[in-house]
Amino acid sequence: MNKVEHRILEGNIGVKQVYDEVADLYDHSKYLYWTRRMEEGEERVVEKWIESLRSPLIDIGCGTGRYVVKKAVEGSDQ
C-alpha cells in the first residue's frame, strides 16, 4: 500500500505555496476531470469573446493565464 504524506499549509504563504506547486500541472491535470469539463464549455465562449479584443491587454489574477498567453502570441505575429 502506498503511504500518502500530508502537509498543512497555513495562511497566505500556504495558499501561495500550493498554487506555486500546482501551477505548471494545473491546465493539464487528469485529476481535475470536472474542472476540465466546465472549462471546455467556458473555453468556447471565452475564445469567441477574446477574438474581438485588441492590445493592450492585462491579466489580473484570472487563473492560469492561458487565454492571455494566446492573445500575446497572436500579438507577436503582427
Image (tube, rainbow, N blue to C red):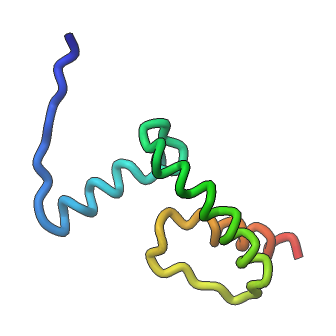
| Foreground of the two, 45 or 9 | 45
Q: Position of residue 56 (x, y in %)?
A: 69, 89
| Foreground of the two, 45 or 19 | 45
Q: Position of residue 47 (x, y in %)?
A: 72, 68
- Count up the numbered dots: 0
**Residue pictured at 20% horizontal, 10% vertical:** 1
Res. 59 image quadrant: bottom right
Q: Position of residue 78 (x, y in %)?
A: 88, 76
| Foreground of the two, 65 or 41 | 41
**Is residue 58 toward the left or the right of residue 23 in the image?**
right
Q: Position of residue 77 (x, y in %)?
A: 86, 70
**Is residue 12 toward the left or the right of residue 77 in the image?**
left
**Residue pictured at 55% horizontal, 49% vertical:** 37
**Is residue 5 toward the left or the right of residue 66 in the image?**
left
**Residue pictured at 65% horizontal, 62% vertical:** 43
**Is residue 47 toward the left or the right of residue 12 in the image?**
right
Residue that lies at the very extreme toward the top in this rendered image: 1
| Foreground of the two, 77 or 52 | 52
In the rendered image, the vertical position of residue 46 relative to residue 20, given as above or below: below
